């Protein structure tokens, strides 16, 4: 896991074991939080208000969205786009409105050429550094706060500490960088308006600045935070699970190394 070193905690894991722990924790976490990602993206791409008061709104709440997606598309819909998400496909937002990855890639390439796979790259690059920096700095700060606030006898469960501090770090960093994630999703699905017709209104954007202006003018400042609630659930669970499983696998490797060295 880039930026986090288990050795200060007294573990003797190799670099390869650390890399494996980080990779496996990422795969497990992505599979577990995929439903929240699907709901978040549906909310982000909906131009209508996320309110039951708007008769044109397809979704207006997390529980309502879960019920509707289950009724209309079945449980597998919560893992649409899961494969490209696992390999960090940039075209993830657009993939969710197509049946298969192959069909999505073929349609996107024929329609707009290779550059279509890099739509939304600008807000992505802008968000990467502050998000990663905030995530690790918040995780470190929260761990220090936890050590200060929790009595010595309550510090035995390290996994709980990692889960709580990781979740808190995810919530804080995601909230501060969320508008950029929304812009990224809006730009990524550009050119696929026909595929989204059944989901409500569609818009065309010329770029990041134009997207920002249109969202502000038509949806207000709250429009920048559409889908924030499932996104925070996802961020809390994602970061919490990531650190939890990372620490778990590092501990497993540490125990294996210790057993091997004692033979």
Image (spheres, rainbow, N blue to C red):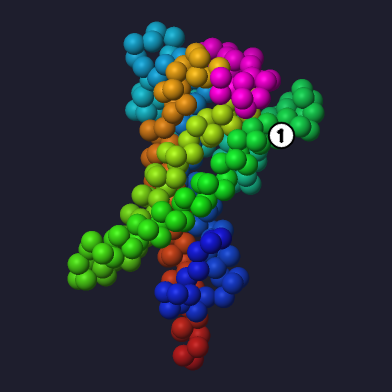
Residue at x 36% of width, y 24% of height: 61
Query: Which quadrant would the N terminus be assigned to in this image?
Result: bottom right
Residue closest to the far bottom: 263
Q: Does the stretch in magenta take in 90?
A: no
Instruction: Decide which of 237, 2 is in the foreground and name it.
Output: 2
Q: Would you say residue 115 is visible in this rendering?
A: yes
Q: Position of residue 203 (x, y in %)?
A: 59, 15
Residue 133, given in percent of the width and then of the height, sits at 51, 52
Label 1: which secondary element: helix
Whether residue 165 sits left or right of residue 127 in the image: it is: left
Residue at 38% across, 10% down = 54
Badge 1: how crowded within 10 Å, few (<14), some, or many (20+)? some
Q: Residue at x 44, y 26 (%)?
A: 226
Return the x and y of residue 125 as percentages of the image width and height.
63, 42
Outermost top residue: 55
Q: Which residue is mark 1?
A: 117
Q: Is residue 211 magenta?
A: yes
Quadrant in the rendering for residue 113: top right
**How many labels, in total?**
1
Asked if residue 123 lies left or right of residue 135, the reply is right
The answer to whether 184 is drawn above or below residue 241 in the figure is above
Residue 100 sits in quarter: top right
Q: Residue 186, percent across and down?
A: 58, 25
| Relative side of 252 to 118, left or right | left
Front residue of 256/9: it is 9
**Magenta segment range?**
191-213
Question: What residue is at 50 percent from the left and 79 percent from the top?
Answer: 12
């Amino acid at each position: 896991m880039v930026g986090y070193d288990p050795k200060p905690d007294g573990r003797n894991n190799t670099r390869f074991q650390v890399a494996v722990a980080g990779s496996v924790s990422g795969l497990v976490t992505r599979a577990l939080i995929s439903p929240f990602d699907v709901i978040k993206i549906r909310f982000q791409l909906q131009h209508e208000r996320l309110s039951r008061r708007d008769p044109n709104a397809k979704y207006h709440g997390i529980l309502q969205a879960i019920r509707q997606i289950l009724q209309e598309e079945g449980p597998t819909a919560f893992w649409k786009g899961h494969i490209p998400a696992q390999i960090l496909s940039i075209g993830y937002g657009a993939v969710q409105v197509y049946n298969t990855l192959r069909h999505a890639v073929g349609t996107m390439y024929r329609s707009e050429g290779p550059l279509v796979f890099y739509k939304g790259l600008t807000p992505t690059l802008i968000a990467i550094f502050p998000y990663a920096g905030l995530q690790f700095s918040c995780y470190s700060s929260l761990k220090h706060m936890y050590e200060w606030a929790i009595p010595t006898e309550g510090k035995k469960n390290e996994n709980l500490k990692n889960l709580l501090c990781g979740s808190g770090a995810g919530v804080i960093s995601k909230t501060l960088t969320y508008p950029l994630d929304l812009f990224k999703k809006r730009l990524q699905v550009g050119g696929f308006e026909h595929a989204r017709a059944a989901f409500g209104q569609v818009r065309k954007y010329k770029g990041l600045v134009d997207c920002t202006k249109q969202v502000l003018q038509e949806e207000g400042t709250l429009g920048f935070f559409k889908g924030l609630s499932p996104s925070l659930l996802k961020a809390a669970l994602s970061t919490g699970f990531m650190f939890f499983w990372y620490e778990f696998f590092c501990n497993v490797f540490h125990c294996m190394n210790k057993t091997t060295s004692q033979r």
